[in-house]
Amino acid sequence: MPPALSLRGVCVVFLLFAACQEKPDVPVARDSPADSPADSADSADSADSGLLPMPWDAPGFWTDPGPLKNRLAPDRVDPLHWQVRMATSPDGIAWTASPDIIAYGFSSLDLLTTDQGVVLSGVIEFIQDDTVLLEMPSVFALVSQDLQTWGSIRFPIADNTRLWVVDPGLRMSRDGALQAHWYGTDAEGNPAGQPGPHEVYRAVWDGTTFRETALLFSHEWLADPSICDQAAEEDSGESQEWLFFTLEGFVVDHAEQDGPDSFAASDAPPYEFVNVPWCVEEAPDSDPDSAPDAAGVTVYAQNTGGGGPPWRVDVAPDGTSTRETLYTGDLFGYDNCTSPAVTWYRDQYVLFCAVYTTH
């Protein structure tokens, strides 16, 4: 991918309405072990228990080709610039790339792992047979239970302030709420090129749809927001949300929660040579129920410029960090892995990437 086009909000300049690109113990919506997906829960049972029915409780959630059916491989006959690809590893060190292409024309990945399957939200590359971009504001996602058969879903957003949903992500909060967050704008065209301020919004699932609840953070320029819980210091009983984002200049910065629905910029220096972050409380673990190894968060990010292997960055509570590449060499044949996300699922580590195929 050309270095100048690697940023999610910059790289998909051909996107008509939304920008593109660029994000184990992963926050999991959990009733049963993550490597043994359960049968779909009955919505009535969820209501009787006082819990909100989740979107994946609906029949056909995991199997319906859905609104992105014209992007799912192998049905796509005129491949687009982006490929959603996957690799697996028994130890998080030695990775084997799947030869299969999950989908085309989808990037800026964000990952939610549930007991029943995985949900990859992201941004859409505009194509001529599109109708989905007329359905904004929405979060679109690819979904699968077995990592072989993929469907897609649209999550509409009610009570929205801004029309376009850019670089969206989904997560489970500590209190069990399903949340969406995104960079919101009213401007058509390339959102990364829009004048500031750039604003991050949140919506919460109410059992039937997402409803916008807050403007979380504003910055003169940002893209690629990702929110996760900072693991609490031992015995402190305290935790807070951190918001990571790509900052102008192709670096990653973060803000820290200073209220129920607000964030303040951190004093820590930006994280250089990486961009398009996706963060989790800690790196995925083969024991998903284990306690966090240490306070802080883990960020997966693409190399600045998009080329080469992605990075894992472990960030301490004071903002200091250590980093390492996830692999060496060229895993997918195009010498890039943008918006990386990693989870532990079905007894293996799984890496998802948006691979840019036009140089």
Image (cartoon, helix red, strand yellow):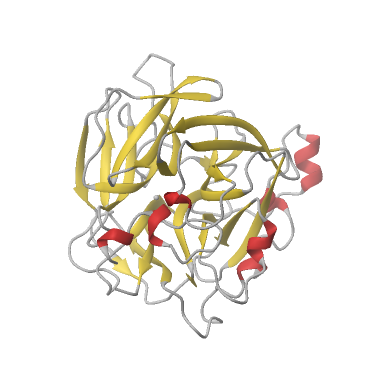
Total numbered badges shown on the rendered structure: 0
Residue at the farthest top position: 236
Q: Nearer the viewer, residue 318 or 1?
A: 1
At a point 78% along the width and 42% down the height, the residue shown is 45
Q: Quadrant of residue 69?
A: bottom right
Quadrant location of the C terminus?
A: bottom left
Residue 194 is situated, as x and y percent measured from the top left of the image, at 46, 47
Report whether residue 89 is seen.
Answer: no
Residue 308 is situated, as x and y percent measured from the top left of the image, at 22, 62
At a point 36% along the width and 37% down the height, the residue shown is 282
| Residue 285 left/right relative to 229 | left
Q: Quadrant of residue 352?
A: bottom left
Residue at the farthest front position: 195
Report whether residue 201 is seen.
Answer: yes
Q: Nearer the viewer, residue 272 or 114?
A: 272
Is residue 92 depicted above or below 226 in this figure?
below
Quadrant location of the N terminus?
A: bottom left
Residue 170 is situated, as x and y percent measured from the top left of the image, at 54, 45
Is residue 91 depicted above or below 278 in this figure?
below
Is residue 275 depicted above or below 141 in this figure?
above
At a point 18% along the width and 61% down the height, the residue shown is 328
| Residue 220 left/right relative to 271 | right
Q: Nearer the viewer, residue 325 or 217?
A: 217
Q: Quadrant of residue 204?
A: top right
At a point 57% along the width and 31% down the height, the residue shown is 215
